Structures are given as C-alpha cells and as structure tokens.
Image: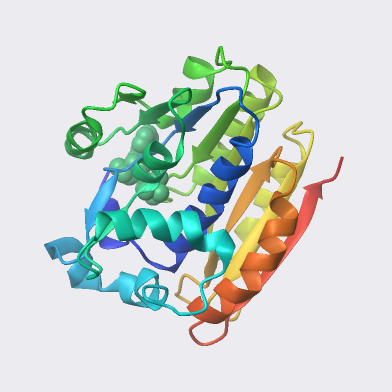
Amino acid sequence: MNYRHAFHAGNHADVFKHLVLTRLIALMSRKEQPFAYLDTHAGIGLYDLKGDQASRTGEYLEGIARLWDTPDLPLLAADYMQVLHEMNPDGQLRYYPGSPELARRLTRPQDRVLLNEKHPEDGRLLKDNMKGDRRVAVHLGEGWHVPRALLPVPEKRAVMLIDPPFEQLDELKRCSQALKEAIGRMRQTAAAIWYPIKDQRQLTRFYQELTSTGAPKLLRVELLVHPLETPQSLNGSGLAIANPPWGLEEELRELLPWLAEKLGQTKGGWRMDWLIAE
Ligand code: SAM
C-alpha cells in the first residue's frame, strides 16, 4: 500500500467527488429519518495543502484553488464551500476536507458516520482527526469487507462511498463486486463508486460489470479536464451512483457545466446518463 491521498488532496477529481458527495448528503437529509454514511477507503479525513506531500505535487492548484474566492459560486456548491471556509477562517486556502470530514460536518445529530481505512498510519491520523465526535466510528480493516461487515444498517438508509486508490489492476472489478454485495445486503443503499478516467478499454468492461450489479438504478456522472484519449494522464473521473436520491440528476445537470468550465485544463467536459434506468 504505497498510495497516500495527501499528494492528491483537493485536485480536480477530489473537487468533483466531494461536491457530488455534499449534494448526496444534502438530499438524503431532506427526510427527517437518520441515515448512516459509510466510507470504505476513507483516507485521513483532512489535509494540509501547504504540507510537504500536497505542496510537492501542487495538484490542488488545478482543483480547489480554482474555486476558492470565485465570484460566480452556484448555490449548489454552497455547502461544500462553507465547509472550506469554516476550515480556513482567515481567508487563506490551506486546509482541505477529505470525504470523512465533509460527511462529519454535513450530517445531522441523528446520523452516523462509519469510516474505514486500512493503511495503519493513515488510520491513526483519521482516528485523531475524527476524535471527539461520538457519531463517528473509525474501523481499521479491509475496505472490501465493509458491505458485508456493516450492511444492512439499522437506520435502513445509507450513503456509501467506495473510493479505492486504484493501485492494483483488479480494483475496478472489486468496486462492482462491492456494489453488488452492498445492493444484495441493503437494496436501497445510495452507493457511489469513484473511478479514474484513463483507460477506455478497462472502463468499457467496468461499465458492463456495473450493469449486472442488480442495482435498481445506476447513474453515471463524469467530469473531464482533458480530452478522453490523452495518453498517460488522468483525463477526468467518474462516479457511478446507485439509488441516487430524487433530485440529484437535476442538480448535477445544473452544477456540472459550471464545474467543467472551472476545472477544465486542455479541455473540460462532462456527461451524465443512466447505466441502469428504473
Ligand atoms: N475517500 C477519501 C476522500 O475522498 O477523502 C480518499 C481515499 S483515497 C483515494 C484511498 C484510501 O484507501 C487511501 O487512504 C488508502 O490508504 C486506502 N486503502 C488502500 N487500500 C485499502 C483497502 N484494501 N482497504 C481500505 N483502505 C484502503
């Protein structure tokens, strides 16, 4: 396990994933009943963009730095940017929330946040960063075991993020297997898989695997910062979202053109369609 998310924190893929996650949480919160947030590959929870790792790559400069202080912020980005401003009260962009911190801050007192991270050092940092909030539980186990270990949840409502590092070739396949398992154990889980857009052949197979997961509905959302076939580069990223809450598709249709324009590098773009329609 060599991957450390701190090198990539706040890059275009993080901004896309986290912005969509904030909308998922907001829409799930429309009903009073509690829900559980589950993160299979949680990372450390918060990141110092001026720290050694993030500043060595500077990836955040083409990500969150492009949104910071932007005058034309759409309303749908307000929750996300509010967390950022709370974390950086002096107006200088320095600290960036990972998915655990966004979930912790945006969920309600009745909700629970269940996090899993396998890397021992990152797990310790995550525990440290989450301490003091009794709604949060941190597990230091195998991310691929999360669906069978934690689903179904007693709340009967769940948002799950599946966000592995893609260090190994089989991880796309493991994502669709994890989704299938999650749906098998709790059919209504709103589960989002994040994936990199690099190799179109691998992705074609992945899309096929996703369609046989048994998810009742599956939305595919992608944000590009380079043209699709640019070699050797992360051309963008996608989220496959099972059981998206009502309203998410419309919200993303409004948000994504703005985001593609903000984050596009050689060429920004986006697309959204249903891999499994109702
Ligand atoms: N979800 C985080 C966020 O959005 O802030 C970022 C997660 S990062 C892309 C992937 C994380 O998975 C890394 O922190 C890595 O240590 C961890 N990891 C790698 N293999 C794992 C496994 N088999 N089970 C659980 N975690 C794993």
Query: Along the horizontal axis of the image, is 26 left or right of 137?
Result: right
For the view shown, which residue lies furthest in the bottom direction?
266
Quadrant in which the C terminus appears: top right
Asked if residue 219 is positioned above or below residue 270 in the image, the reply reads: above
Residue 76: percent from left, percent from top: 58, 60
Asked if residue 97 is positioned above or below residue 129 in the image, the reply reads: below
The residue shown at (47%, 22%) is: 110
- Count of labels in the image: 0
The residue shown at (26%, 49%) is: 46
- Inspect this view and state whether residue 228 appears: no
Q: Nearer the viewer, residue 25 or 151?
A: 25
Residue 177: percent from left, percent from top: 60, 33
Quadrant in which the N terminus appears: top left
> In the picture, residue 210 is in which quadrant?
top right
For the view shown, which residue lies furthest in the left direction?
52
Residue 48: percent from left, percent from top: 19, 58
Query: Along the horizontal axis of the image, is 65 left or right of 198?
Result: left
The residue shown at (47%, 54%) is: 79
> In the picture, residue 237 is in which quadrant?
bottom right
Ligand 1: quadrant of the figure: top left
Q: Colour scheme in the image?
A: rainbow
Asked if residue 142 is positioned above or below residue 206 in the image, the reply reads: above
The residue shown at (57%, 63%) is: 75
For the view shown, which residue lies furthest in the right direction?
278
Residue 54: percent from left, percent from top: 22, 64
- Inspect this view and state whether residue 166 appears: yes
> In the picture, residue 250 is in which quadrant?
bottom right
